Amino acid sequence: MIKKAIYLLLISAILVSCTEDIDVELDTTYARLVVDGSVSADTNRYVIDLTTTSGYFSNIPAPRVVNATVEISDGENTFPLTVSSWST
């Protein structure tokens, strides 16, 4: 009976432990370019998605960058990429 009381007391202490709300203020900074993509040498298919950064707590999707000039280089050759389709 005493063991049950001790276990109950310990469980109660754990469940009723103190909590404190902490407000984290994140610095806002200028928007940065985010480049996400894949390159395949097998199929010569390139998928590049350009967006800009948004706030950490922002509930909207990251804004897309449109009308950008994108090139891939292997150090010797440069391959310009063109827009073929937009995915949402």
Image (cartoon, rainbow, N blue to C red):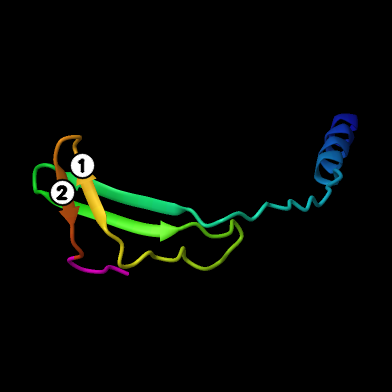
At 53% from the left and 60% from the top, the residue drawn is 54
* Image: 24 above or below 75: below
At 47% from the left and 66% from the top, the residue drawn is 61
Give the quadrant of the N terminus: top right
Q: Neighbour class for label 2 at 10 Å: few (<14), some, many (≥20)?
A: few
Q: Neighbour class for label 1 at 10 Å: few (<14), some, many (≥20)?
A: few
Image position, residue 11 (x, y; %): 81, 39
| Residue type, numbered disc 1 | Ser
* Image: 87 above or below 35: below
User: Which disc, if any, is residue 79?
Assistant: 2
Left or right of residue 33: residue 55: right
Of marks 2 and 1, which one's residue comes earlier in the chain?
Answer: 1
- Give the secondary structure at mark 1: strand
Left or right of residue 62: residue 87: left
Front-lying residue, 65 or 37: 65
Q: Are marks 2 and 1 in contact (CB under 8 Å)?
A: yes
User: Which disc, if any, is residue 73?
Assistant: 1
At 73% from the left and 53% from the top, the residue drawn is 25
Front-lying residue, 19 or 64: 64
Q: Is residue 42 magenta?
A: no
Boundaries of the magenta span: 84-88
Quarter of the view holding residue 39: top left
**In whole angstroms, how far apart are the C-alphas of marks 2 and 1?**
6 Å
* Image: 76 above or below 32: above
| Residue type, numbered disc 2 | Phe
- Give the secondary structure at mark 2: strand
At 18% from the left and 37% from the top, the residue drawn is 74
